[in-house]
């Protein structure tokens, strides 16, 4: 049997441009590294690829190549277990300190993931908490406060974190229940959406039932409520071979750290992956 040809890698213009910029001697931000206010306030030390993912995002927000382009929707495609939640925790501090964001909406697809994330980001008594007990930036204490709605009057040195399922947030957008957040609430102050397991939120790019399409529409409604709202998606699974998915995300993939690289770097536990079209070696 003849050896199967290796599948051609699809171009990802944003990621490719950032990769070239990262290697360029003319990059004005070339000496940038993960700031002390992140490394000093987090329990875990970033691995090289987490530092690179944060650096690529930083480039997209500040370098002259991107300064006049609106990069407000990106996707981090990173292997399961590679520390996406740590990266999210670091991005929260980065966007708060460098770009003045205080409101963060963390979206998940299931209650189980939601409870884990609550421990990761807000429960100081949990051994899964990712920050140091007292977050301090530039000599001032910064509080991370879990909320169900973003307050109209916001306190200094406070990060507001709303953690919810996409189903619940979509329901609130469409039904306008009392004490729920509607479109106008996301238009009042700038918001960052952190969408975990993002492959669940692209229903309109596939043939899916109407309920799932509404999730994607709800996220787009929040993103578009203000020009400076941002959407950061995270997933280990993205079907770029699907033409519709590829067209949606080809200009949004900002960093990739695939499972094969994760295994090659020996960070992964033993993984048995079976794919019938591949040779045993592949």
Image (tube, grey):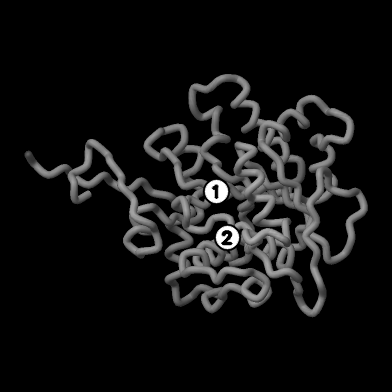
Question: Image quarter for residue 139?
Answer: bottom right
The residue pinned by badge 1 equals: 234
SS under mark 2: helix
| Left or right: 161 as drawn, with respect to 77 | right
- Residue at (64% x, 77% y) in the render: 36
Foreground residue, 185 or 143? Answer: 143
Task: Examine the rendered structure and indicate whether residue 103 appears above or below residue 207.
Answer: below
Work out how far the residue at label 1 is from the one at label 2, CA to CA, in angstroms: 10 Å
Q: Residues within 10 Å of mark 2 (few under 14, many from 20)?
A: some
**How far across and down, in percent of the image, does residue 50 sit?**
51, 64
Can residue 228 be seen by looking at this rendering?
Answer: no
- Residue at (92% x, 53% y) in the render: 153
Q: Residue furthest left?
A: 1
Q: Which mark is residue 271?
A: none
Q: What is the number of callouts on the image?
A: 2
- Residue at (44% x, 72% y) in the render: 24
The residue pinned by badge 2 equals: 87
């Amino acid at each position: 049997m003849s050896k199967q040809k290796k599948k051609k890698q699809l171009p990802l213009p944003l990621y490719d441009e950032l990769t070239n910029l990262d290697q360029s001697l003319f990059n004005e931000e070339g000496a940038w590294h993960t700031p002390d206010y992140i490394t000093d306030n987090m329990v875990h030390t970033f691995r090289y690829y987490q530092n690179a993912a944060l650096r690529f995002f930083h480039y997209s927000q500040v370098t002259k190549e991107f300064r006049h382009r609106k990069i407000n929707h990106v996707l981090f495609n990173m292997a399961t277990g590679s520390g996406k939640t740590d990266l999210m925790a670091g991005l929260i501090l980065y966007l708060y300190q460098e770009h003045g964001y205080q409101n963060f909406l963390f979206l998940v697809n299931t209650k189980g993931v939601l409870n884990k994330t609550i421990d990761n980001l807000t429960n100081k008594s949990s051994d899964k908490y990712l920050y140091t007990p007292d977050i301090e930036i530039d000599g001032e204490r910064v509080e991370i406060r879990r909320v169900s709605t973003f307050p109209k009057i916001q306190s200094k040195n406070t990060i507001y974190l709303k953690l919810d399922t996409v189903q619940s947030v979509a329901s609130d957008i469409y039904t306008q229940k009392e004490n729920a957040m509607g479109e106008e609430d996301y238009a009042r102050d700038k918001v960052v959406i952190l969408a975990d397991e993002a492959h669940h939120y692209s229903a309109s790019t596939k043939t899916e039932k109407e309920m799932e399409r509404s999730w994607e529409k709800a996220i787009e409604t929040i993103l578009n409520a203000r020009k400076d709202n941002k959407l950061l998606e995270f997933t280990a699974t993205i079907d770029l071979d699907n033409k519709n998915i590829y067209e949606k995300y080809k200009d949004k993939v900002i960093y990739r750290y695939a499972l094969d690289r994760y295994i090659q770097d020996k960070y992964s536990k033993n993984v048995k992956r079976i794919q019938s079209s591949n040779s045993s070696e592949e």
